[in-house]
Image (tube, rainbow, N blue to C red):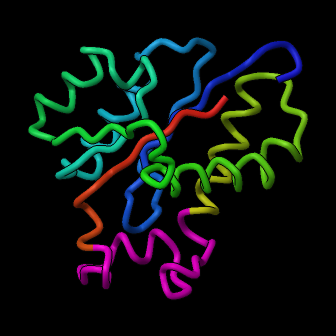
Amino acid sequence: MRRGFLYLVAVMDWATRKVLSWRVSNTMEADFCIAAVEEAIRRFGVPEIFNTDQGSQFTSPRFTGVLAAAGIRISMDGRGRWMDNVFIERLWRSLKYECVYLHAYETGSELRAGLLAWVGLYNARRPHTALAGRTPDEVYGSARPLPAHGHAREQATVGLAA
């Protein structure tokens, strides 16, 4: 942002690349991360495993407590384990180059509106090669498991972008 930073967190289904929830904040506190996770659980159910990096928001007892209370196994990337978050990192790259860098958002409200439109397009209309040309919504909504990936609701991942 021209006058400061806003931080974005997203919860993504690992197998289907569907963005389940996201939040923007002007602080690096854990609250907006917790809100995104709680929304994803409320709307889409409890994943078996939840993967994060080791940022302070994700290692805080408040954040890990939400996962533990829901019976979710916690996986945190170790040093040099960039592959664990490759899907969320790809999301950040696409989002930055296709949305954020193309618009000079002046306010948080403008950014949120832009992100809402972009995430909607990403989930519903953007086919993925790794999903056999289907969109994340199509694959997530199908009852069939994905080959070599397991069932769509087995693992979620979260990431933070500045």
Q: Nearer the viewer, residue 127 or 51?
A: 51
Q: Is 40 on the left-hand or right-hand side of 48?
A: right
Asked which quadrant contains residue 35, the reply is top left
Q: Is residue 98 magenta?
A: no
Q: Position of residue 109 (x, y in %)?
A: 71, 26
Q: Position of residue 30 (x, y in %)?
A: 42, 17
Asked which quadrant contains residue 126, the reply is bottom right
Q: Nearer the viewer, residue 16 or 121?
A: 16
Q: Residue 5, relative to residue 134: is it above or below?
A: above
Q: Position of residue 43 (x, y in %)?
A: 29, 47
Identify which residue is drawn at 24% across, 25% down. Answer: 64
Q: Is 143 on the left-hand or right-hand side of 5?
A: left
Identify which residue is drawn at 61% across, 62% down. Answer: 122
Q: Is residue 147 magenta?
A: yes
Q: Residue 150, relative to residue 88: is it above or below?
A: below
Asked which quadrant contains residue 55, the reply is top left
Quadrant containing the N terminus is: top right
Q: Which residues are magenta?
A: 123-149
Q: Position of residue 31 (x, y in %)?
A: 41, 16
